[in-house]
Image (tube, helix red, strand yellow):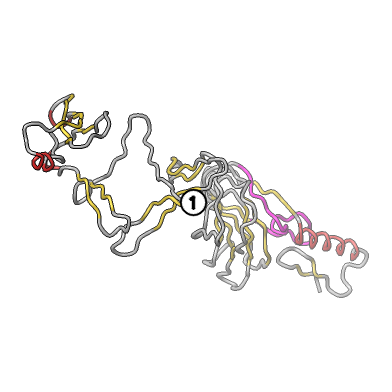
Amino acid sequence: MASTFTPLGVELQATGENAGTWGTKTNTNLQIIEQIAGGFIQKSIAGGAQQTDLVVSDGSTGAELSHRMIEFTGTITGNQVVTIPLDVQTFYFLRNSTSGAYTVQFKYITGSGGTVTFSATDKGDKIVFAMANDGTNPDIKEIALGLTEIVSDTSPQLGGNLDTNSFMIDFDDAHGIRDENANEQLIFETTSSAVNHVDMTNGATGNGPQIGAVGGDTNISLKLRPKATGNIEVMGATNPGSIQLNCESNSHGIKLTSPPHSASQSYELKFPTGNVTADRFLKVESVSGSGTTGVGQLSFAEVSGISTGKAIAMAIVFG
C-alpha cells in the first residue's frame, strides 16, 4: 500500500513501505509538524484584485499553508482573496502587512461557508480557525481576543461600546476627542493639582441635561470663556434665546429673553461703567451705530422732575 498524506502534507507511511528511506521521511514529517506548530512565513499578495491559493506540498517542508503564522505582504491595488483547500483543519495567526487601502479575505477555496476579512484600514493581526466542518461549505471563524496592546495599531477600532468599568480615561494635556473627519471636537487642558472639575448629567423626560461645577472646594464658579472678540451665545429654537436665573431651590426663576426673529434686532446693550448708585435708573446714555445693530451704552441716571413713586416704577425702564 502506498503512502497517503494529511491535508497539511504529513506523509502517512504504509506498513513495510519505504525501506531504507523511512528515517528520512520521518524526519521530514517531524519538520512539517514543527512548521505547522510554530512556523512563520511571509506571503506576498501584491497586485490588483486577485485570488491567491495556498496549496499543500505533500511530504515536503515549506508549504505556505502548513505554517502557524502567515504574514501577508506587498502593495495591493485591489481587494485580495486568499484561500486554503477544503479539507484543511487548523488555526492560523494571520498578519496583514500589506500597503494599500483594500480588503484581504481569508477563506476556503470553494463553498459559501464563513470567511474572515481584514478591512481596508485593518493592518493588524487575527487568529482564525479553519473548521473543515462541512465537505462543501466549511467555515473559517475568527477567534475573538481580549484587548492586549494597541500602541502599534495606528488606527484601532472598537467592535462595540467602550465600558470603562468604573475606571477613568486619561487624556494628555491639550488632547481629547476628534470627530469622524479627524477634526478636534473636545479638547481637555490640565491644571496642576486640580481639585475642581465639570460634571455633566443627562436628563430624564421633562428635564434638561446639566453642566455643573463640582470638586473639593465649597463654593465653585462655572466659567465660560470665548476666544478673542467672540461671544457666549444662547441659541434660540422654537422660542427666542433665553437665560433663566433661578432661586436657590431651583423652583422659581426670572428670564432675560431676546426679541423674536420677526423683530430683526441685533442691538447690544453695555452695562454702566460707573458704580452702582441708589435711587437711580438705567437709561441709554449713548448709541454707536444705528438701527437694528446699534450699540447702546447704559448709565445710572438720576431721576428728576418726577415723584419718588414714579421714579421707582421707572427703575427698570431703559432710556
The residue furthest front is 308
Query: What stretch of residues is rendered in magenta?
Result: 54-74
Q: Residue at x 86, y 63 (%)?
A: 25
The spot of residue 258 in percent (x, y) is: 19, 43
Check if residue 120 falls in the magenta segment. no
Residue 280 in percent (x, y) is at 18, 35
Please state if 177 lies on the left or on the right of 14 as rendered. left
Give 111 or 147, whichever is nearer the viewer.
147
Q: Quadrant of the C terminus?
A: top left
Q: Residue at x 31, y 35 (%)?
A: 231
**In the rendered picture of this protein, how many numbered marks are placed on residues?**
1
Q: Where is residue 313 in the image (x, y as percent from the top left)?
A: 11, 43
Majority secondary structure of magenta residues: loop
Question: Up-down: is 225 above or below 41?
Answer: above
Mark 1 packing: few (<14 Cα in 10 Å), some, or many (20+)?
Answer: few
The quadrant in which the N terminus is found is bottom right
Q: Is residue 123 above or below residue 301?
A: below
* Residue under numbered circle 1: 215
Residue 71 colored in magenta in the image: yes
